[in-house]
Amino acid sequence: MTLNITTIHETDDPRLKAYRNIHEKDLVGRQHQFIAEGKVVLSALLHSKDFSASSLLIVAARLLGIMPILKATKPTCPIYCVPQKVMDNIAGFHVHRGMLGIGERKTLPSLQDFLKNLPEKTLVPVLCGISNHDNMGAIFRNAAAFACHGIIVDKTSCDPLYRKAIRVSVGAALKIPYTQGTDIDSIIEALNDADFHLYALSPSAPRYLKEAKSTKRTAIILGAEGDGLPAHILQKSETLRIPMAYGFDSLNVATASGIALAHFADFDKLN
C-alpha cells in the first residue's frame, strides 16, 4: 500500500486549513475533531480502533522518524509534509515535536452503556470538576498505568481530548474508555445501582488510604484542587486520605490519583 504523502511549501494552502491557529480552535471546539501532537500521541491515534485520523501534518525533517509507524498502521488519510517554518506559521506557535494530526471524535457511550460494558471486577476513577487540562491528561496516564477499565468524567470537567490533555496523557486519552456528560449526582446513583463501592479522596477523611481494601467493583471519586469534592458527595462515599507531612493537607489531584490507583490496582495485570 502506498502512503498518501504530499509536500506543501505554502502557508496559505487550503488543505492545511484545519491546522490553522490551533491554540484558538482548542478553546472553541473543533466540530467533532481534535488535535494530536507528537510521535507518541500520533502512534496512539493511528493504532486506535476507536478513533481515526483525517489527516497528518509532518515536518519534512521528522518524516523519517515516524515512517515505521506509518508503514505499520498504513493510514489512508492525507499526510502533508511541510518545512518547520510553514508548520509554525500555520499552527500559530513553534511545534517543536514537528508532528500534528487531526483526529475524528467518536460518539461517547452513555453512562449506562459504559457501566454495562465493564468487567465484573473493575477499577474506575470518577472525575468531578477537573478543569485543568494537565491534571486531566495525567489522570488518564495514571489510569492506563494502573490498568483501570475506564474513566467516568462528569459534565463540569474539561475535555479529555483537548490537545494539551492528550499530550500530557501520552496518548492514554485515546486508549482508555471513558464517558462524559452526566452530573455527579446521577453518576453516584448509577454506580450504586451497579454495585460499586465508592471511595472519595479528602484531606479531612477519618481513614487513611492504606487501610482501604479493594472490592470487586471499585470507584474512586476525585475532585478539583482547592474546592475539592462537594460535601454531599463525601457523605455518599467512604472517604480516605493520603498521609503526608505536618503542614501539608493536600496533593495535586493527578498525584493523588496515581497513589490511590496504585493502592487499588490489580497487580496481576501489572508488570
Image (cartoon, rainbow, N blue to C red):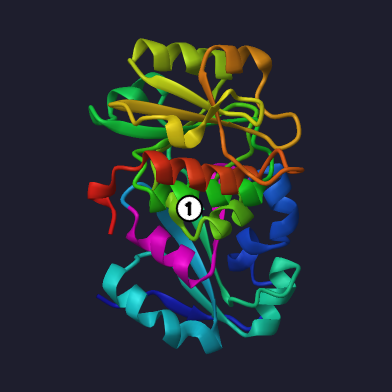
Q: Could one spot residue 151 in this view of the protein?
A: yes
- Residue 191: x, y in percent? 41, 17
Residue at 39% across, 37% down: 150
166, 214: nearer the viewer:
214
Would residue 17 be counted in the magenta stretch?
no
| Side of 6 relative to 28 (left or right) | left
- Residue 163: x, y in percent? 61, 55
The residue wearing badge 1 is 141
In the image, the segment drawn in magenta is 30-48
SS of the residue under disc 1: helix
Circle 1 crowding by C-alpha within 10 Å: few under 14, some 14–19, many from 20: many
| Side of 155 relative to 217 (left or right) | right
Residue at 42% across, 46% down: 262
241, 199: nearer the viewer:
241
Q: Give above or below for 255 relative to 186.
A: below
Three-letter code, disc 1:
Arg
Quadrant containing the N terminus in the rendered view: bottom left
Residue at 41% across, 59% down: 45
Q: Give above or below for 54 relative to 206.
A: below
